[in-house]
Amino acid sequence: MSSPSSPTRGRPARLDQARTVQTALDLLDESGLDALTMRRLADALGVQAGALYRYFATKQDLLTAMAERMVGGVAGAGLAGDGDWSESVACLARALRTALLAHRDGARVFAGTHSTGPNTLGFSDSLVGVLREAGFSDDEAARALYAVANFTVGHTLEEQAAVPPQGEEPTDAGKLGEAVRAGMYPHLAATLPVLTSTDFTAHFEFGLRLLLDGLGAVEQ
Amino acid sequence: MSSPSSPTRGRPARLDQARTVQTALDLLDESGLDALTMRRLADALGVQAGALYRYFATKQDLLTAMAERMVGGVAGAGLAGDGDWSESVACLARALRTALLAHRDGARVFAGTHSTGPNTLGFSDSLVGVLREAGFSDDEAARALYAVANFTVGHTLEEQAAVPPQGEEPTDAGKLGEAVRAGMYPHLAATLPVLTSTDFTAHFEFGLRLLLDGLGAVEQ
DNA sequence: ACCTGAACACCGTTCAAGT
DNA sequence: ACCTGAACACCGTTCAAGT
């Protein structure tokens, strides 16, 4: 309740958790995760690197706070639609993907951390709640959460890796094309246009539909 | 065909790509991805760090070769079962998960790279092939590959993060328990036993079933 | 041709000392 | 109480020089 920031009377601290996380997210968007170092972040905050350790015990803790902040508001997406559990779950999954896409390397940051903050737990509680209230068992609801969340994060990880934010060529679809045209992989060759398509929203919606239809079958 | 390893007559090179990748995988299993540095790998190979760069232009290239090696043989899993596309796809997904689980941090290595080698492309071609031959369209087959692969990798990423290989407490289920018992999150509280269950195979099979049932609905 | 030795430009983290 | 300065123990990568 009063760790490093009680209402003190000395000169106000230049740093606090909220401003540090915000600046870290700005730096992430500008330069990407690989360029987000404690020293560069300290520079952006006008401070020495060591000072950050009064607010975050490790860099991993900072990344966790960033992930938690990124998914703020996502839990509320479960209230859309009018009582259709399938649409509510879809909205939650879409909101999670959108929140991760909103920051460069957002999925990598999220996948690399395990926040137990209110935004992250609120999302999980919301999704599990929608399914329990729709009549699914506790086991089914919890496992559906795993399936939807893991698919969404895994998908967004691929999406952000495949579509580099600005400059450099997408080095990936290119090498895939070469390799596939080399001869083997007849099935990949036939489906190359879809595989290298950048319409990731369509890919995402397809996978999400599979999961929801599968859940509909569980419901009987 | 003859870059750094022609059949020369001088003293044989101490290094080659295959031995380097194998030693790197051994080191990964012993110490984990964070401890896998070019210097430590060089040490294990009895060589200086700089020497590795004759065989791999960057550390990322080495990691890609490791990922490619990890999924060797996975493509063959599509031949199991007797013509049931659903069982073939399930076998491919299970084989991928098993291959990633076979190495410490295997999913992290795989998710962080994008191999276009024969093992990785063979897996994709195999899965797409099973579906195309079962009558799915090219679009459906390609998108199903995305869905199954992203779910499997996302799931295994979580699994390996949740179950620390040997020592240290699972710091994760613990903090989740605290936070959930604090009051809010009634739905998480009700499903806590399932959420903190370590039966990841059951979780995986549930999600996989959803995807396959969803695909069955597409088939009509 | 292959590897060493040494350097370059960094990292995350700690901690006495200042204010 | 909060931050600086400086250090510790590392990183990935490059490249002249040796053999």
Image (spheres, coloured by chain):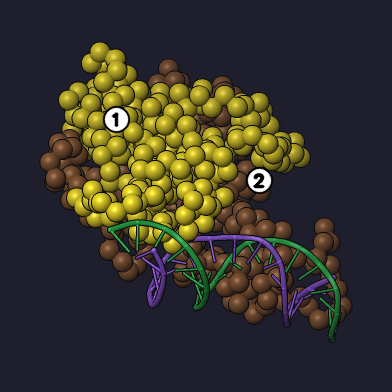
Chain colours: A yellow, B brown, C purple, D green
Q: Going 51% across and 43% down the picture, which residue do you hit?
A: A28
Please name the residue that numbered disc 2 is placed on. B116
In the rendered structure, the answer to whether residue B65 lies left or right of residue D1 reads right
Residue B55's image quarter? bottom right
- The percent position of residue A50, horizontal first and vertical second, equals 44, 62
> Is residue A181 positioned above or below A54 on the image?
above
Evaluate whether label 2 is on the same chain as label 1.
Answer: no
Q: Going 68% across and 32% down the picture, which residue do you hit?
A: A189
Comparing A121 with A38, the one in front is: A38
In the rendered structure, the answer to whether residue B39 lies left or right of residue B171 reads right
Chain for numbered disc 1: A
- The percent position of residue B65, horizontal first and vertical second, equals 63, 56
> Is residue B69 positioned above or below D11 on the image?
above
Q: Going 42% across and 31% down the picture, which residue do you hit?
A: A99
**Crowd around label 2: few <14 · some 14–19 · many ≥20 (10 Å):** many
Determine if residue A184 is in view.
Answer: no
Which quadrant does the N terminus of chain B fall into?
bottom right
Which quadrant does the C terminus of chain B fall into?
top left
Chain for numbered disc 2: B
Please name the residue that numbered disc 1 is placed on. A75
- The percent position of residue B182, horizontal first and vertical second, equals 14, 45
Q: Going 72% across and 58% down the picture, which residue do you hit?
A: B57
In the rendered structure, the answer to whether residue A3 lies left or right of residue B55 reads left
Instruction: Residue A125: give its label.
Output: none
Q: Amino acid at mark 2?
A: Thr
Question: Mark 2 and 1 residues: CB-CB less than 8 Å, in contact?
Answer: no
